[in-house]
Image (cartoon, grey):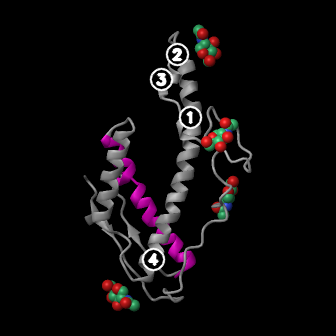
Amino acid sequence: MVIATALLFFSFVALAACSSSTCTFIPSINATTTNYPGSSFVKTSTYPYNVSDLSNVPIATICTSPTGNRTAELACARTYIDAIDEQLAFLYARRLGYAAVAGVSKFATNTSLNEPSRNDVVAAGMAAKVLKFGATEAAGAVMGGEGCMIYAALEYEAEIIQEDCDSRFTVDVERVCK
Ligand SMILES: *[C@@H]1O[C@H](CO)[C@@H](O)[C@H](O)[C@H]1NC(C)=O
Ligand SMILES: *[C@@H]1O[C@H](CO)[C@@H](O)[C@H](O)[C@H]1NC(C)=O
Ligand SMILES: *[C@@H]1O[C@H](CO)[C@@H](O)[C@H](O)[C@H]1NC(C)=O
Ligand SMILES: *[C@@H]1O[C@H](CO)[C@@H](O)[C@H](O)[C@H]1NC(C)=O
């Protein structure tokens, strides 16, 4: 794990403009129960599978061309990648919502947003899960935090705290993503 937590510098300007005890996370107007991939309430392009049902996500060999047509394979792969990105984006936005709740919660109790031990657990957990579902631990670790997800979440949490709690709150994150 190469999470260089030593490179994360957090400066709290905890001069509590509004009372931190009453501060709560206000979700985006786009975070609704009807706004999700495949929702009948959302007009979207047609997906190559039922995005509301994970059991419908095919294994990538569905794009292997029996005649070795590489152009067809590439086009096919991109179609599925775009659909999966829709699901990832949705889950990522949902996840960031929970990160914001955690961030505001920590802000309200004057606790540091960054918890290096927790970051390690998240990255290791994602590595194990990605391996379990068919890719590599190394790729999962990057998604979980060795890359950018944790840094992006910390910056998002700080932004939310600025909007919902204290406009003077600052957090300086020096990313170590490669
Ligand atoms: C909501 O989503 C639309 C795109 O569908 C985007 O243009 C808009 O900026 C989003 N609004 C907010 C508040 O995030
Ligand atoms: C897609 O999957 C969802 C969840 O399983 C199901 O409710 C829905 O009927 C499916 N849609 C189609 C078009 O099969
Ligand atoms: C290969 O696939 C592409 C895209 O589907 C198609 O346009 C092209 O005609 C195919 N080439 C051959 C040799 O079948
Ligand atoms: C918040 O924590 C900081 C750093 O630990 C400390 O200096 C400050 O007094 C605390 N503020 C409150 C309101 O407890």
Q: Is mark 2 within 8 Å of ligand 3?
A: yes
Front-lying residue, 175 or 22: 22
Q: Amino acid at mark 1?
A: Asn
- Amino acid type at circle 2 is Ser
Q: Is tag 1's residue or tag 2's residue first in the polypeptide sequence?
A: 1
Badge 2 crowding class, 10 Å Cα cut-off, few under 14, some 14 to 19, many 20 or more, is some
Task: For ligand 2, tell me if the residue under mark 1 lies within 8 Å.
Answer: yes
Residue tagged 4: 105
Residue 100 image point, x, y percent: 49, 68
Q: Which tag is nearer the camera, tag 1 or tag 3? A: 1
Q: In the rendered image, which residue does mark 2 sit on? A: 65
| Mark 1 surroundings within 10 Å by alpha-carbon count, few (fewer than 14), some (14 through 19), many (20 or more) | few
Label drawn at residue 61: 3
Report the span colored magenta. Answer: 137-166
In the rendered structure, which amino acid carries the disc numbered 3? Answer: Thr
Circle nearer the N terminus (1, 4): 1
Determine whether the residue tagged by mark 3 lies in a helix, strand or loop.
helix
